[in-house]
Image: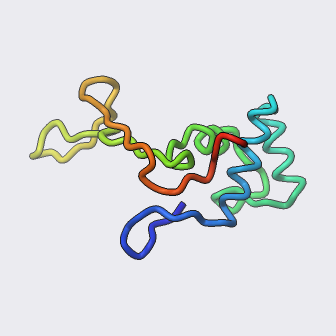
Amino acid sequence: MRSGPKGKLEIDEEEAGVVRLSFRMSKEGASLLQISQTLQKQGILSPRGKAVWSRESLRKILNNEKYLGLVVLQKTFVENCLSHKQIKNDGQRDKYEIIGNHEPIITEDI
């Protein structure tokens, strides 16, 4: 996903192919290691440009709600406006999910 001219999220087709393959393999029961090996065999570089995909990179892809067309607000918050320190929201504040905010990469058929 990338920001379009008006700030709306748009699909990056090169990235979308990797995301779809990862989701499809995961849905079929493949482990993170198996997905990593498949991507490596296909010569697809990781987001950091490495030949080997880390399990953490794949876990982040599979847990990223933006690929489903969702946006979650207030994942972090600033408790003290003087320090400006971001705090992870682990239930201290309400989170809001916006469904259909942008075109999803992953659909029900994957």
> Residue 53, image x and y in percent?
73, 48
Name the residue at the bottom extreme.
5
Name the residue at the right extreme.
41
Q: Considering the image in quadrants, where does the C terminus appear? A: top right
Please tell me which residue is depicted at 51% across the width and 65% down the height of the picture. 10
Please tell me which residue is depicted at 75% across the width and 60% down the height of the picture. 45
Please tell me which residue is depicted at 41% across the width and 46% down the height of the picture. 71
Q: Looking at this view, is 49 or 41 the one in front?
A: 41
Q: Left or right of 41: which side holds 72?
A: left
Q: Quadrant of residue 57?
A: top right
Name the residue at the top extreme.
91
Q: Quadrant of residue 107?
A: top right
The mark total stands at: 0
> Residue 24, image x and y in percent?
76, 41
Q: Looking at this view, is 102 or 55 the one in front?
A: 102
Q: Considering the image in quadrants, where does the N terminus appear? A: bottom right
> Residue 42, image x and y in percent?
87, 57
